[in-house]
C-alpha cells in the first residue's frame, strides 16, 4: 500500500508542477503569471517527478505489471489534481505542501 501511495504522491506533485507551468493555472493558483524562468523550472520539476515515479515503479517488479501500476497512479493523480484545480484552487499550494510531506513520509516507510 505504501508503494502505491508513494507513486501517487509523486505523480500528483508532478502534475501540480506541470499545471503550475500553464499561464491559466498560474493565475488560478498564484493570482499572477510566473516569470519565464519559474515556468521552465516548474516544467522541469514536473517531468523529473513523473520520471522518478516511473523509475521507482520499474525497479520494484516485472516491467509489464509495474507499467500498469504506474498508469493507475497517474490516472488517480490526474483526477485528484483536476478536481483540486476545479474546486480547491485557492488551497492548492497547501495541498502541494501536504503532498510533498506525504511523499517523503511514504518514501521513508517504503525504503526503510
Image: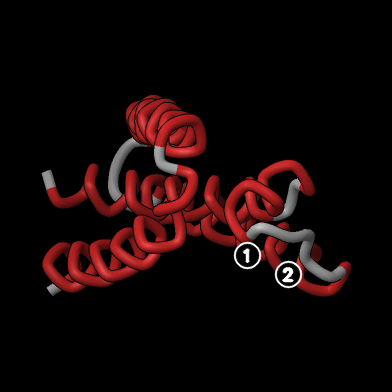
Horizontal relation, residue 107 to residue 10: left or right: left
Q: Is residue 4 left or right of residue 15?
A: left
As drawn, 73 above or below 58: above
User: Quick check: 46 above or below 38?
Assistant: above
46 or 39, nearer to the observer:
39
Depicted 49 relative to depicted 79: above or below: below
- Residue carrying label 2: 41
* Quarter occupied by residue 88: top left
**Residue 91 image point, x, y percent:** 40, 53
Q: For this rendering, which residue is in front, 6 or 112?
A: 6
| Residue placed under numbered mark 1 in the picture | 45
Residue at horizontal 72 percent and vertical 57 percent from the top: 43
At 19% from the left and 69% from the top, the residue drawn is: 105
Q: Is residue 71 visible in the rendered structure shown here?
A: no
Is there a contact, CB below 8 Å, between mark 1 and mark 2? yes
Rendered location of residue 106, percent (x, y): 19, 62
78 on left or right of 33: left
Callout 2: few (<14), some (14-19), or many (20+) C-alpha neighbours within 10 Å?
some
The quadrant of the image that shows the N terminus is top left
Considering depth in this image, is 5 or 57 the residue closer to the camera? Answer: 5
| Secondary structure beneath label 2 | helix
Q: Which quadrant holds residue 40?
A: bottom right
- 82 vs 68, left or right, is right
Amino acid at each position: 500500500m505504501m508503494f502505491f501511495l508513494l507513486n501517487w504522491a509523486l505523480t500528483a506533485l508532478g502534475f501540480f508542477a506541470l499545471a503550475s507551468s500553464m499561464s491559466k493555472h498560474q493565475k488560478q493558483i498564484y493570482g499572477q503569471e510566473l516569470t519565464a524562468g519559474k515556468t521552465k523550472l516548474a516544467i522541469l520539476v514536473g517531468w523529473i517527478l513523473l520520471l522518478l515515479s516511473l523509475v521507482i515503479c520499474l525497479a520494484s517488479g516485472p516491467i509489464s505489471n509495474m507499467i500498469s501500476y504506474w498508469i493507475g497512479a497517474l490516472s488517480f493523480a490526474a483526477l485528484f489534481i483536476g478536481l483540486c484545480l476545479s474546486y480547491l484552487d485557492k488551497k492548492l499550494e497547501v495541498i502541494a505542501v501536504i503532498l510533498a510531506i506525504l511523499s517523503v513520509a511514504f518514501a521513508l516507510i517504503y525504503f526503510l
